[in-house]
Image (cartoon, grey):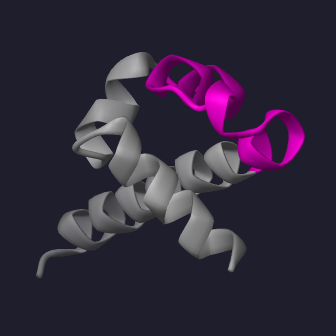
Amino acid sequence: MASDDVTRYARGATRRLALIEAAASLLLEQGLASLSHRAVAARAGFPLASTTYYFDSADDLCDQALRHLA
């Protein structure tokens, strides 16, 4: 893997983790009903497209957030 590829992969992994952490904090603060792609993106400070890029659905995002909290 080239150096640029490693940097890009690390940046993507960091962004994905930030989205999971944002989703987890929303779950803890406001409950399951508060979890949406839009709310998570806003909490993380990323564009809405980021959530749909890294997670297939809101259920996938919720599952990852719950795993993170466990």
Could you tell me if residue 66 is visible in this image?
Answer: yes
Q: 69 and 54: which one is in front? A: 69
Q: Is residue 51 left or right of residue 3?
A: right
Q: Position of residue 60 (x, y in %)?
A: 35, 52
Q: Position of residue 49 (x, y in %)?
A: 32, 22
Relative to 60, does residue 22 appear above or below in the rendering? above
Q: 15 and 10: which one is in front? A: 15
Tally the numbered discs.
Answer: 0
Relative to 38, does residue 46 appear above or below in the rendering? below
Residue at figure coordinates x 40%, y 67% from the top left: 10
Q: Is residue 58 left or right of residue 3?
A: right
Q: Position of residue 53 (x, y in %)?
A: 25, 38
> Where the N terminus falls, by quadrant?
bottom left
Residue at figure coordinates x 42%, y 19% from the top left: 48
By secondary structure, the bulk of the magenta-drawn segment is best described as helix
Relative to 33, does residue 13 appear above or below in the rendering? below
Q: Which residues are magenta?
A: 25-46
Q: Position of residue 27 (x, y in %)?
A: 73, 45
Q: 48 and 68: which one is in front? A: 68
Residue at the left extreme, as displayed: 1
> Where the C terminus falls, by quadrant?
bottom right
Residue at figure coordinates x 29%, y 58% from the top left: 8
Could you tell me if residue 45 is visible in this image?
Answer: no
Residue at figure coordinates x 57%, y 59% from the top left: 65
Q: Is residue 12 left or right of residue 31?
A: left
32 in magenta: yes
11 in magenta: no
